[in-house]
Image (spheres, coloured by chain):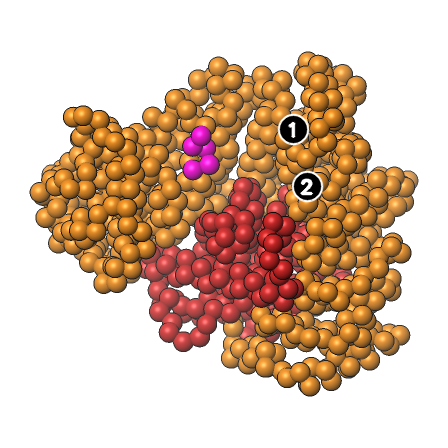
Chain colours: A red, B orange
Amino acid sequence: MVHAFLIHTLRAPKAEEGLCRVLYSCFFGAENSPDDPRPRGPERDRLLRKEQILATARQVESMWQLQQQACGRPGMDLQSQSSDEPVPLQEAPCGAFRLAAGDPFQEPRTVVWLAVLSLGFTLVLDAHENLLLAEGTLRLLARLLLDHLRLLVPGANFLLRADRIEGILTRFLPHGQLLFLNDQFVQGLEKEFSAAWPR
Amino acid sequence: MFTAAAESLLRQAREIQAEELKKFCSRVCQLLQKEDLGPDALDALRRLFLIVSATKYNRRLEKTCVDLLQTTLCSPSCPEPLQLLCAAVLREMSPSDSLSLSWEHVQNTRQLGLLASVLLAQGDQKLVRSVGQRVLKVLESRQPEGPSLRHLLPVMSKVASLAPDTLHEDQTSALNKRLVDWLRYASVQQGVAHSSGGFFSTPRARQPGPVTEVDGAVATDFFTVLSTGQHFTEDQWLNVQAFSMLRAWLLHSGPGGPRTPAADDRSELEGSTLSVLSAASTASHLLPPQERLREKAFEYCQRLIEQSNRRALRKADSDLQKAVSAPWQAGGQALAAPSECGMVSPQCLVEAVLVLDVLCRQDPSFLYRTLSCLRALHARLCGDPACVRALLPIARFFLTHGEAAAVGAEAVYQHLFTRLPSDHFHSPMLAFEFIQFCRDSLPLFGRNLGILRMSFPNLFKFLAWNSPPLTSEFVALLPVLLDAGTAVETLHLLLDLPCLTAALDLHLRSSQAASERPLWDVSLRTPGCLEALRDPQFQGLFQHLLRAKASGTPERLAPLHQLLQPLASCARVAQCAEAVPTLLQAFFSAVTQVSPLPGSSVPTAEEQPEPGLAAAQPPQWQKVRRRGPGQPAGTAASGEKRLALPGPGV
């Protein structure tokens, strides 16, 4: 199952300014440590969760930058994609890596990421998941989010449209459950979503 | 895409002051208390979500506001976007002391699901269990026109993973029975389109026709995730969800899962006497629920394997056909991207094999039926490039069960370790999965460990090409990969790892067709090196470097170092070079822990390597030798701030 999903920025490999920003994140359930005797306030738990997410986003950004450099594309012009061209999701860079227990999540986790222009889409998974399914789900989510939030239209701002993101996640990744959706199911769900969120 | 305007919006959200937030909360309350929740309310909630989520520090919202969010979430007439936002804000604020959700009277299953997501985010085991109990009550209800259960089954799966002891044995049995119904007896007629574009279809007199297989033929057997149709029924949807959660559920409720001790003895006894019966599926209705679920799960997996053999016909899959033909020689990333209908097949295949593995572990009587099926599947997949990642769970299955079934699966391992790395080292996802497979299966290799060890040159190709995500994996793997016979050769290959990266880059340049998307470093041109690749003088050395198996004797690669010099500035080579000190550290940790046999050729840190090699690699080698083994790997990495690209050669 998926533990968390995040959307974050990706800065070009040699970028000096700016920070890696988490634009949207969602946890499915919470890690808990019943053996921990120290009393932990809810504020501290929340802070920890946010920091875990940020740490993950930074690692993904770093992995993506290294992969871009290794392919010989360090200074890719991220703004060059016009809004009319379909984003070549089949060729979007992706990768996976393991996070050891405690660093930063309590349990060992696997991270699968997908980069579309300057946005990163990341899944934090339980340690032994069907990675082929996870990767497929991530591409599907990215496609849906790009389509329904019009992320490529300059100036369009999805920070204020979290309801659409939630609407997509609730159908295609309910409670963090990865689903084996063939194309017909995807179409059906998408129609249902479009009906509730007319463009 | 991330514009200055967005950055400024985030900053505003973070910097909003308490006073201003208080005023905003009152406005939100006003809007939510209206009869008609319109676009203003939606806009306000969107902003509220941004404010709460933009900062990692807590935002104190007025109690009235929080209470109103909870009420709105539970209100039956609230439009979905608003409900989702209320739930999202409450989840963002979790864990929270001020939640007082009362959900006893909530009937709508979609809202129930949303409430569950908020409660599960609190990190409180008691709450998780109570969510489980509530959801189970609804799942057990059998009203034909009842609530749509597809919003709740994933909750059950999540609860089982967070708090495995939530359900009593009887409840698990009850759920097992329902899962059997959904997996095996879902309707094989297509659903009817709902007029409002919804998904749930009610039974009508006129049936639109049967569901089809992916190749357009009428469905030959029961409904699965690979069945297609224009519209789907509720139970078909539950079929998809039930399969999606099946493996985790089997593991949760299987032997070793949480059970009371008395029940344990009883059901193990039942299992052993009835497992003979389970071999004949006609008697399956006599089985207790858990065994019945396993039997149906087995049938489901077999059907998936049969269905995946069909050629998908849909338009989306003509792209798949294209992707399979031309660029396949280099096996680009595109093929690891299963997002359309036909590409669901490899995902399902992997899952089917994983589920069969769990079933055979829980009930060995499944083994004889599975082995022949998987051997045939393996033979089929070996020739199908689109399914290469499905070979890994098959190999794992044979590692787990091969001994018990007295099956020699050497052919499976040979193919895995010889062909896959050579052909697919450049695919980041396959590389990661392959090395995970090696790490996770280590205890299972047994007498097959030799194949793994002898294949280290091939495994290092994954590392040489994808060093950032795989370095830590190899540090963990090295101690097991090493033995007295291969240690020296391994050391040499580690020192030559950046050379290997460069050689792999050249190999791709020379073997990929011009029309394919290049996998090598496009910022670098190396005409001279490419010619050298074809020079008979150097071919032997290249072949040695690119070998698939340990050869037993290290070769002097100094001439190659000179030749590959132009590629030293390649970023991938540099990344690999940066990883080498860490790997050497791990290597020496591993070898010095094993007490050397008398007369063995395992080098200690004090021994000199071949002079030629040392001369070619002075900076790293000398640094590592000075530091010696047993020091934390951190010093190795941090000491290399200005890391010399390895030596005068590459």
Subunit bearing disc 1:
B
From this view, report whether residue B375 is shown above or below residue B626.
Answer: above
Subunit bearing disc 2:
B
Rounded to the nearest whole Å, what is the CA distance between mark 2 and mark 1?
13 Å
- For the point 75% across and 73% down, the residue is B42
| Region rendered in magenta | B439-443
Q: Would residue B229 appear left or right of A32 to someone viewing this image? A: right
Residue sitting nearer the eye, B629 or A5: B629
Q: Would residue A118 appear left or right of B478 to someone viewing this image? A: right
Percent of width and height locating residue B465: 33, 48
Mark 1, secondary structure of its residue: loop
Residue B255 is marked as: 1
Mark 2, secondary structure of its residue: loop
Q: Dividing the picture into quarters, in which one does residue B493 lie?
A: top left
- Is residue B508 among the parts visible in the rendering? no
Q: Amino acid at mark 1?
A: Pro
Query: In the image, are marks 2 and 1 on the same chain?
Result: yes
Percent of width and height locating residue B92: 66, 65
- For the point 34% across and 60% down, the residue is A69
Q: Residue furthest front?
A: A37
From this view, report whether residue B46 is shown above or below residue B136.
Answer: below
Q: Which residue is mark 2?
A: B164
- For the point 44% across and 21% down, the residue is B409
Residue A1 is marked as: none
Q: Dividing the picture into quarters, in which one does residue B613 lie?
A: top left
Q: Amino acid at mark 2?
A: Pro
